[in-house]
């Protein structure tokens, strides 16, 4: 039963319509009233006064104001035990025309007049109940960024409440309406079309990454070394649109794969021809560089009677080894080769060396004079072979048959003795010839 109901009931029973009167109600509860003093002669001495201007007490009022007491005593004694005490104002139940937030005595604690209804105040009722810790109340509209969250707290009170942790989008601030306002984004544009500009999330600093060489930067120009330029041969960028095959910055070395006219050093083996028959010329088509390898070591005909060499003009050649020019080599010549019968010269250098070789067929009455060789060995047989060895016996008339030395033994090489010439039928002095 509400306080208003009790007061109405008391007025009807005790005919005391003013017992709950007064306009000074401030709160539904207070300290205990002192209770009224005993009525005497039909009047209450002084109504029980509620402590703290009508705050509710938990006393029952003076016990003296009972059935035999005067009406005044009973009325005021009873009201002392009520919520307001003697002279306190009556609590509101009807909120018609009352301002939102006006305390009223409805069902539950902390009831207030909200939109002319006495209700339990709560977050979301569009009334800011600071006694409940609310700082705002927008009816829980679902938008926590509009200055008031659905917990009836301000979206922000300090700039730091608005910090989104991204320094690149600027410093966020909290305005007077408790709404976060975005800051000004960091401008990292360096006005260079050849760099990619960005902001570092960690500290808000700017980076400027160079674009790849060859990236178009407008007006027919290209990004080269982070600068927007017109491409030319020698700028280290291969501009195929201008017929360049390579570009090493015109380093002055035309053999490194790229010539100073921005063309490859080579694309085929023919490009590597060094006009030297003694090299193998090869183009590396990956690096476009030439390799000219000496092939002189491959000039070998396998014949010991030749000296193998390479002539830059004609290539490999095999020169016959014959120091004395007599047509014979001192070495053993290759069987089946062009000099197969021209080896075995027993003396190829020195005095009279040309007179001595395996091809000598003549006989000589004088020694060859070649030191170290068998005397009279002209044909390299390692011995002196006598030309005339016959010993005279008798002649056959009219025939040279029977001619011979008129000695017991043939004379030695270079020695002179009598020779019987049967053809002439006479004796002659003749010197023995050898080879």
Image (cartoon, helix red, strand yellow):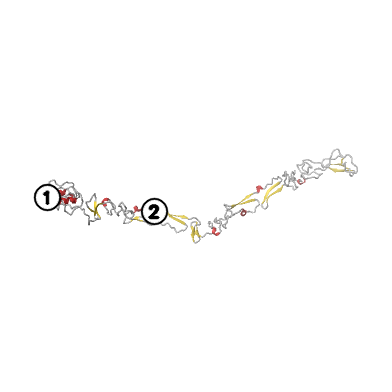
Considering only vertical position in the picture, is 296 above or below 241?
Answer: above
Category of crowding for the residue at label 2, using alpha-carbon neighbours closer than 10 angstroms: few (below 14), some (14–19), many (at least 20): many
Category of crowding for the residue at label 1, using alpha-carbon neighbours closer than 10 angstroms: few (below 14), some (14–19), many (at least 20): many
Mark whose residue sits in front, 1 or 2 = 1
Residue 270: give x, y in percent of width and height: 62, 54
Considering only vertical position in the picture, is 396 above or below 11?
Answer: above
- Quarter holding residue 137: bottom left
For marks 1 and 2 on the same chain, the one whose residue lies earlier in the sequence: 1
Find residue 210 and name its label. Answer: none
Residue 310: give x, y in percent of width and height: 67, 50
* Near-viewer residue (121 or 133): 121
Tell me if residue 45 can be seen: no
Residue 3: give x, y in percent of width and height: 19, 50
Position of 64 compared to 198: left or right?
Answer: left
Instruction: List the single residue furthest toward the bottom.
Output: 219
Find residue 71 and name its label. Answer: 1
Position of 387 compared to 254: left or right?
Answer: right
Task: Tell how many labels.
Answer: 2
Q: Secondary structure at mark 1?
A: helix
Position of 225 compared to 52: left or right?
Answer: right
User: What residue does disc 2 label?
Assistant: 167
């Amino acid at each position: 039963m509400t306080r208003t109901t009790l007061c109405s009931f008391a007025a009807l029973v005790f005919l005391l319509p003013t017992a709950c009167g007064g306009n000074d109600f401030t709160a539904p509860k207070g300290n205990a009233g002192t209770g009224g003093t005993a009525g005497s002669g039909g009047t209450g001495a002084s109504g029980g006064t509620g402590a703290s201007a009508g705050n509710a007490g938990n006393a029952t009022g003076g016990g003296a104001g009972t059935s035999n007491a005067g009406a005044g005593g009973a009325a005021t004694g009873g009201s002392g035990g009520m919520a307001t005490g003697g002279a306190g104002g009556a609590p509101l139940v009807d909120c018609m025309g009352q301002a939102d937030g006006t305390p009223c005595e409805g069902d539950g604690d902390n009831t207030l007049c909200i939109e002319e209804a006495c209700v339990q105040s709560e977050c979301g009722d569009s009334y800011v109940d600071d006694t409940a810790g609310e700082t705002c109340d927008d009816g829980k509209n679902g938008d926590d960024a509009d200055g008031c969250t659905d917990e009836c707290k301000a979206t922000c009170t300090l700039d730091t409440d608005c910090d989104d942790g991204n320094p690149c989008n600027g410093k966020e601030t909290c305005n007077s309406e408790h709404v976060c306002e975005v800051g000004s984004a960091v401008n990292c544009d360096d006005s260079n079309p050849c760099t990619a500009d960005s902001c570092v999330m960690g500290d808000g600093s700017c980076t400027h990454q160079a674009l790849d060489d060859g990236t178009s930067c407008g007006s027919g120009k290209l990004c080269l070394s982070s600068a927007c330029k017109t491409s030319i041969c020698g700028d280290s960028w291969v501009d195929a649109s201008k017929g360049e095959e390579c570009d090493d910055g015109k380093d002055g070395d035309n053999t490194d794969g790229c010539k100073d006219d921005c063309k490859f050093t080579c694309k085929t083996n023919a490009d590597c021809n060094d006009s030297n028959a003694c090299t193998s010329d090869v183009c590396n088509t990956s690096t476009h560089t030439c390799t000219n390898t000496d092939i002189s070591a491959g000039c070998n005909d396998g014949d010991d009677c030749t000296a193998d060499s390479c002539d830059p003009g004609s290539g490999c050649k095999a020169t016959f080894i014959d120091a004395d020019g007599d047509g014979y080599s001192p070495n053993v010549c290759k069987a089946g080769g062009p000099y197969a019968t021209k080896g075995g010269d027993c003396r190829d250098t020195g005095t009279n060396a040309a007179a001595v070789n395996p091809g000598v067929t003549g006989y000589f009455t004088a020694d060859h004079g070649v030191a170290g060789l068998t005397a009279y060995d002209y044909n390299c047989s390692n011995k002196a072979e006598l030309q005339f060895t016959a010993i005279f016996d008798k002649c056959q008339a009219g025939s040279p048959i029977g001619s011979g030395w008129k000695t017991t033994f043939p004379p030695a090489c270079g020695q002179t003795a009598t020779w019987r010439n049967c053809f002439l039928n006479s004796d002659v002095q003749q010197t023995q010839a050898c080879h």
